[in-house]
Image: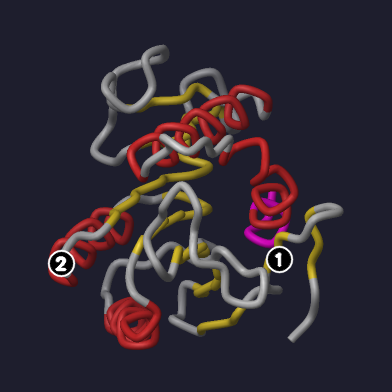
Amino acid sequence: MTVEELYTNFCDNFKGICKSTPDSDQEELCRNINNYFYNLGLDNNCAVYTKPHVVKQGKQGFLVDLCWASKKNSEDSYGLDLALESEWGSSRDKIMDEFYKLMVLKAFIKLMIIGRFQQEINSLLEAMSKTIQNSSVKYPGEEYLIIFFPDGYKAKPKIKNGQIFIGYKISFQGKLQPLKPHFLNNNSNSHAAY
């Protein structure tokens, strides 16, 4: 699965993941997102590791909020297909601390989900990109998927032009690329180019 495929899949399934009710909150959305990636990992024949308080089922957590492991060339060879960290409303330093965990893991896709204010997104992306560029530990081919919820999350999120979250891809060289925005409308989930 590529970063683009993972993001498109997330976008296409967001209404079902969100399941917002008048009592929904950020914690519920975070739990639903983690359950979504837990089940998606199982669907992709991976062993899924997560923290017990994040997803009630599954194997004990492994350094990050959630990761997928699968057998590679032999019975004794494992690798991480995906590593996921999420931070909602935390300080910039806390977000970067969680991002550093992703950087040191060898995983094909490193997914960071962040709830922060719109005006902080560019500076965080720049810091992440620069940190990757300057890192001495890189796994060729690894890619980062960063999903921002610009206003955190509320039961009735503030939707700017129908957009609830924004996706970015960062290569192992630190090259930043915006992904197609995801819009919610009354008819269906849709994608639109910039």
Between circles 1 and 2, the one closer to the viewer is: 1
Q: Which residues are magenta?
A: 1-6
Residue 3 falls within the magenta-colored stretch: yes
User: Which SS class for mark 2?
Assistant: loop
Hey, what amino acid is under mark 2?
A: Ser
Circle number at residue 183: 1
Indicate the quadrant where residue 59 lies: top left
Name the residue at 46% across, 47% down: 155
What residue is shown with label 2?
91
Q: Is residue 21 above or below residue 5?
A: above
3 left or right of 194 in image: left
Work out whether mark 1 precedes mark 2 in sequence or the reverse, and give the earlier one: 2
Considering every residue shown, the one lying at the far front of the view is 22
Which color mode does the image show? secondary structure
Hey, what amino acid is under mark 1?
A: Phe
Name the residue at 33% across, 28% down: 54
Residue 58 position within the rendered picture, expressed as x and y whole percent measured from the top left: 41, 14
> Could you say which is closer to the camera, residue 193 or residue 40?
193
User: Which SS class for mark 1?
Assistant: strand
Name the residue at 62% across, 31% down: 40
Q: Is residue 83 above or below residue 79?
A: below
Circle number at residue 41: none
108 left or right of 53 in image: right
Q: Quadrant of the C terminus?
A: bottom right
72 left or right of 49 in image: right
